[in-house]
Amino acid sequence: MLRTRAGQLLGDIAAWRLPEVAWSRPAAAVEALATAYDTGDELAFRAAVSRLEVLSPNRVDRIEDPADVPPPEPLQERVTTLVQLVVDPAERTAGEADGDDRG
C-alpha cells in the first residue's frame, strides 16, 4: 500500500508546476525516498512519502503563476527510475493488463 502511494506521488510529479526555486524541496524528498528504498529503511521511506504528500501542489488549491515550471529534467529522470523500482511489479503487470499504463 505504501509503495503504491509512493508510486502515485512520484508519477504525479511530472504534472506539478512550481516556482523554479521551489523545486529543491521536492527533489530532496525524492532523494530521501530513494535512499530509504535503497537501504530498506521502512520508517524513512514512510517519512519521505509523507513529505512528498505535504509538498504536493495538488494537496492545496493554489493560484497558478505563469512563472511556475515543470520539474527540472534531472528530477524527472530520477522520478521515472524510482517509479519502476518502487511500484510492486505485480501491480504494474495488473495495471498493464487492464490497459492502465500509469505504473
Image (cartoon, rainbow, N blue to C red):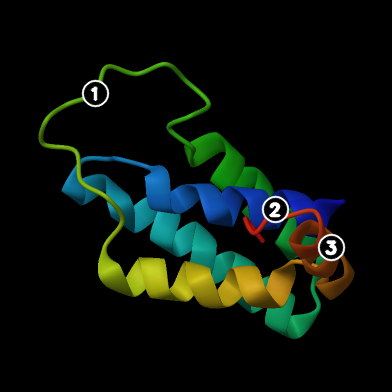
Q: Is residue 27 left or right of residue 79?
A: left
What residue do we see at 80% from left, 54% from top? Answer: 98
Please say if 29 is above or below 16. Answer: below
Quadrant hosting residue 32: bottom right
Q: Of the two numbered discs 2 and 1 on the same chain, state the one appearing first in sequence.
A: 1
What residue do we see at 69% from left, 77% from top? Answer: 85
Q: Position of residue 12 (x, y in %)?
A: 51, 47
Of badges 1 and 3, nearer the viewer stands 3
Provide the residue designation for mark 2.
100
Who is closer to the viewer here, 27 or 8?
8
Provide the residue designation for mark 1.
64
Quadrant hosting residue 94: bottom right
Q: Looking at the picture, which amino acid does disc 1 mark?
A: Glu
Q: From the image, which quarter does the C terminus lie in?
A: bottom right
Mark 3 element type: helix
Mark 1 element type: loop
Judge the density around disc 3: few (<14), some (14-19), many (≥20) Cα neighbours within 10 Å. Answer: few
Q: Looking at the picture, which amino acid does disc 3 mark?
A: Glu
Q: Position of residue 37 (x, y in %)?
A: 72, 75
Provide the residue designation for mark 3.
91
Please say if 27 is above or below 14. Answer: below
Q: Of the two numbered discs 3 and 2 on the same chain, state the one appearing first in sequence.
A: 3
Of badges 2 and 1, nearer the viewer stands 2
What residue do we see at 42% from left, 16% from top? Answer: 61
